[in-house]
Image (cartoon, rainbow, N blue to C red):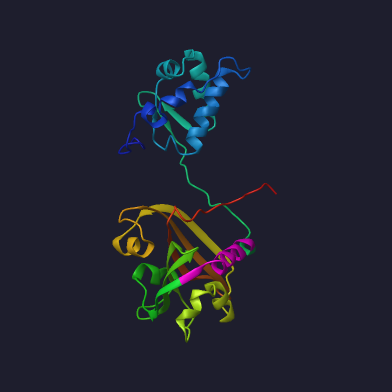
Amino acid sequence: MRNQYQGLPVTAFDTLLGESQFKELDKNSPTPLYFQLYSLLKTLILDGTLPFGTRMPTEEVLATLFSVSRITAKRAMDDLAGEGLLERRRGKGTHVTYKYSPRPVKAPLVGMLQEIETMARNSRARVIRCSLQEPPQAIRDELGLKPGEQALHLIRVRQRDKLDFGYYVSWTAGVDIPADPAIFENTPRLSYFREKGLEVTHVTQTLSATEASAEVSEALNVKPGSALLSLTRRSFNKHSDGEHMHDHLHVLYNPLHFQYEMDLKID
């Protein structure tokens, strides 16, 4: 039988956790040590710190790392295996079987769109490019455009208090170029789209980090290679035949002049 973990990178357990993790068990706590160890390992598995395929140490090694008895280590491992988070196979060791997958944060759309428009109204945009042209193939595919079909292409730099904080690149299907591109200096794109009958019914956002290219560094007045906050926003609207993406926005923020803050509460 083929080993399902064959070919997976095996990283030393202690390298994944770091020495600080080995000091988290509290021998003076009323919570049993086995449950402390079980809870710690479970959290590290569920949040992806110990990814799928990671080979766990033996009970003897685990007991040494956390300064507990082998019986304590065995009980913690047994409970994790019982929940399907670990698989123990004779001669092959114990491996993590849980596959971590990040889940998107869900938030009310109306409130988020209002916040986007508020930020736009409280800042000013410098329009670098405004044209109708054929998007790159990857974006054309996302927008559902055929070869040769065009979209509204905007490149802007947004400024507040005379500080350039964001480099905005967008592609929008289904709208024409305005008579005066300067409208986007003070009017939020969402307001313009709404006036043209393009309503947003669903938005997805992805946050990451990247480095400033030569073009972006010049626009934001930062050094090439500087760390930037990257946001990709995809906006959709509903049609009779389903939901379609109509807008692709990629923003690069200078973290010295911009922070993306969220305040999430339990309903």
> For the image shown, how many numbered marks are present on the structure?
0
Name the image quarter holding residue 60. top left
**In terms of secondary structure, what is the magenta stretch mainly?**
helix
Name the image quarter holding residue 30. top right
Residue 79 in sight in this render = no
In the image, which residues are magenta?
Answer: 111-125
Q: Is residue 110 left or right of residue 186?
A: right
- The image position of residue 88, as x and y in percent, is 43, 27
Residue 232, above or below 188: above
- The image position of residue 162, as x and y in percent, is 46, 64
Residue 62, above or below 204: above
Question: Residue sitting at 53 percent across and 25 percent down?
Answer: 38
- The image position of residue 175, as x and y in percent, is 49, 81
Q: Is residue 103 left or right of residue 209?
A: right
Q: Is residue 265 left or right of residue 16?
A: right
**Residue 21 among magenta residues:** no
